[in-house]
Image (cartoon, rainbow, N blue to C red):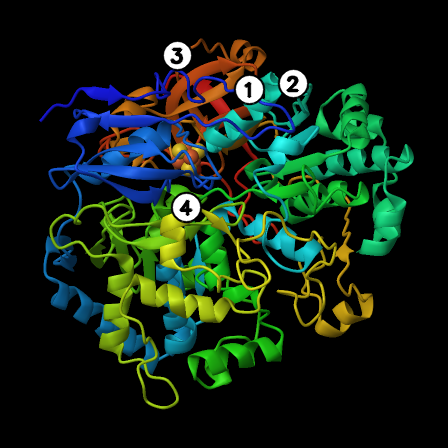
Amino acid sequence: MTHAPTEGSGAGDRIADPWGARTPYGPEDAWPVRIDTFLDGVAEAQVDRWVHSACVLCSNGCGLDIAVAGGRMVGVRGRAGDRVNRGRLGPKGLFGWQANLAADRLTRPLVREGGALAESDWDTAMDRIVQRSRQQLDTPGPGSIGFYTSGQLFLEEYYTLGVIGKAGLGTPHMDGNTRLCTATAGQALKETFGTDGQPASYTDVDHADTIFHYGHNLAATQTVLWSRVLDRRRGPNPPRLVVVDPRPTPVAQEADVHLAIRPGTNLALLNGLLREIIEHGWIDRAFIDAHTVGFDQLAETVGSYDPERVARICGVPADQVREAARILGTGERLLSTALQGVYQSMGATTAACQVNNLNLVRGMIGRPGCGVLQMNGQPTAQNTRETGADGDLPGFRNWDNEAHIRELAELWNVDPIVIPHWAPPTHAMQIWRYAEQGSIGLLWISATNPAVSLPELPRIRSILASEGLFVVVQDAFLTETAQFADVVLPTAIWGEKTGTFTNTDRTVHLSERAVDPPGEARSDLDIWLDYARRMDFRDRDGKPLISWHDAEGAFEAWKACSRGRPCDYTGLTYERLRDAGGIQWPCNDQHPDGAERLYTDLVFNTDPEVCENYGHDLLSGAVTTATEYKASNPAGRAILKAADYQPPHELPSEDYPLLFTTGRSVYHFHTRTKTGRARQLDQAAPDAWVELSAADAERHGIGEGDLVRVESRRGRVEVLARITGIAEGTVFAPFHYGYFDTGGAEPDGRPRAANELTITEWDPVSKQPYYKVCAVRITKGV
Ligand code: SF4
């Protein structure tokens, strides 16, 4: 059936204009409502019902309703009353839901037979997983089982997985693809403020007089938040805007100062900005003395980063550094945001900490217009980090704090020794290394596609294909990763199941089941509940370890786990979320309607009994011990950490003379598993490309649209060239593109996944891979 699109008010041509019509407003006003609707082939009167939900195609978490007609999804409409988006939806939100209707959804479990995947049934598939799990548990033990999950599932699913892994199996090897996108955000918040959790709120855009976007192309990654910034910029008393990005993104083009930095040099620039602010006395000394520790060391560390030195390292004019610092140093209400330009680059956690430090030395936190958003990439990454599905312990508990372990053991009624806490949790890059070396024999991958998203793909494909590794993949589609699996479990996705999720600014939304999943597909929650039953996980009294049977039961269990912790959900219920839309945590007796921003009392979560970990040495990544941490006596004060800039390890050379960096398109999310199956989004950006400067193009005899080969020491891609205003010496490619729709890299198709080129290296503190810097060469033709 072919549908003609019916676009409601405000939707316009959201492909040509991703941010929609401006609704200007001033600092004392509420952000005006603009309701965006897209119905595919039906008029509004034909919609049978609108089902309460929110968008899961980026971390903005826009409230929306799903339109259902004849038992099928037919469109979406932004929720006017939602605090996050006030009715707006971006291109991914408007069109991305159509992936649910794709003809190639998985509808039955698949098992590997004679080298090929064959359709099967749930009992056969689950029996194979249970049998392999028992084998691994017998010999060599729980440490031979690894889980690699997502930033796209629901809170209830993550928490259930977390309890299975930590209290059922007892494996320390759990992480999410959040390691690739938000591990640094979480870690930088822990290093500075004691625990994860964003200090600021999106409403701080409404009040700020200065906005600082560092490595954060929100025009592509959080289009609705960018609409909010643009609306402030077009209204009375607009905020000043400072942007750091090597590319001339729409955000950079809007800026008052755009620092087109050389990839890999963030820390030198941030140290230089802090030096200027300190040198000019643009600091709040009383705030620093009362509410922080570490200022003297910070001042000493940044002292040698004068603008000329920064200019030499970072490739930006010294006067621009001075002007950016003046803007950041002289406003009254500073909102700073960071994303992958910081998190996926050299010195990631240290650089992200300097973004925190900028606000702290200016005393700008915990009040309207003042704060930090260490943004998340994926829509539900916050929940992966909160619930323990990423290896951290649930409720921001500290693996190195025996009292926190005892709390969990009592809650789950298990022996504390079962809960892995003898070392920091295993991070994803190490889990993959263990799989490569053979010590992990069962790797269970859910709702993510590492065969496109991890660095150095030739290595990842080889690990997935290795003989001794039993791979389970849980997904809605036969992804590039699923093709390697021993068992593939077909899943229900957003709109076909009920659950909650939390966006970057701590807003919790309920997303209800609107339609049935296709065929025999099941929710990830039902799959893990089934696994727990079949494995017969029991508590200390012989009762089932997992006592809940549905999403609301899992949510209630999570609430009990979150009680008293910074991410306290105890004041939330499905009914409240249904009635009120998004509500921010903490929501409890103290904050019955949720908390707009954290740290309004200027007491940070750094007390040793509260904090989520004791931090790290930022240069080496060495863990700080409890004794060392207590000796620094932060006691509720924020921790100003600093370190010297270190250059990237793989720099341009004669053979590989250009710097390679990856990023995102406004039309796609992650590896296009969903957005590549939404007609408008796919047509807007159907194939991979590479961006280079006019000077580099001329030097290599490359013209716009030429097919080029880009090679690193690890692999190559063959894609079309775009000549843009990107900094000379830098080459950019979007990371979204894999091979599900091209027949494979070789021999049938040309290699086009940006991660064929990237390097297996990561930040020593957050363990987030460096996608933003490696050396490549480029040639015309293939
Ligand atoms: S900004 Fe993000 S959450 Fe909002 S509609 Fe776009 S993709 Fe969805």
Q: Position of residue 556 (x, y in %)?
A: 39, 67
**Mark 3: which secondary structure?**
loop
Task: Determine if the C-beta at disc 4 is less than 8 A from ligand 1.
Answer: no
User: What amino acid does circle 3 point to?
Assistant: Gly
Horizontally, is 612 left or right of 44 in the view?
A: right
Q: Which residue is mark 3?
A: 705
Cβ atoms at labels 3 and 1 below 8 Å apart = no
- The answer, for residue 189, to whether it is visible in the render is yes
Cβ atoms at labels 1 and 4 below 8 Å apart = no
Mark number displayed over residue 581: 4
- CA gap between label 4 and label 3 equals 46 Å
Q: Position of residue 492 (x, y in %)?
A: 23, 51
Horizontally, is 478 left or right of 77 in the view?
A: left
**Mark 1: which secondary structure?**
loop
Q: Position of residue 614 (x, y in %)?
A: 68, 66
User: What amino acid does circle 4 point to?
Assistant: Gly
Question: Quick check: 612 above or below 203?
Answer: below
User: What amino acid does circle 2 point to?
Assistant: Pro
First along the sequence among labels 2 and 3: 2
Task: Determine if the C-beta at disc 3 is less than 8 A from ligand 1.
Answer: no
Horizontally, is 733 left or right of 345 in the view?
A: left
Is 20 in front, or is 482? 20
Task: Determine if the C-beta at disc 2 is less than 8 A from ligand 1.
Answer: no
- CA gap between label 1 and label 4 equals 24 Å
Mark number displayed over residue 236: 2
Question: Quick check: 752 above or below 721?
Answer: below
Q: Which residue is mark 1?
A: 24
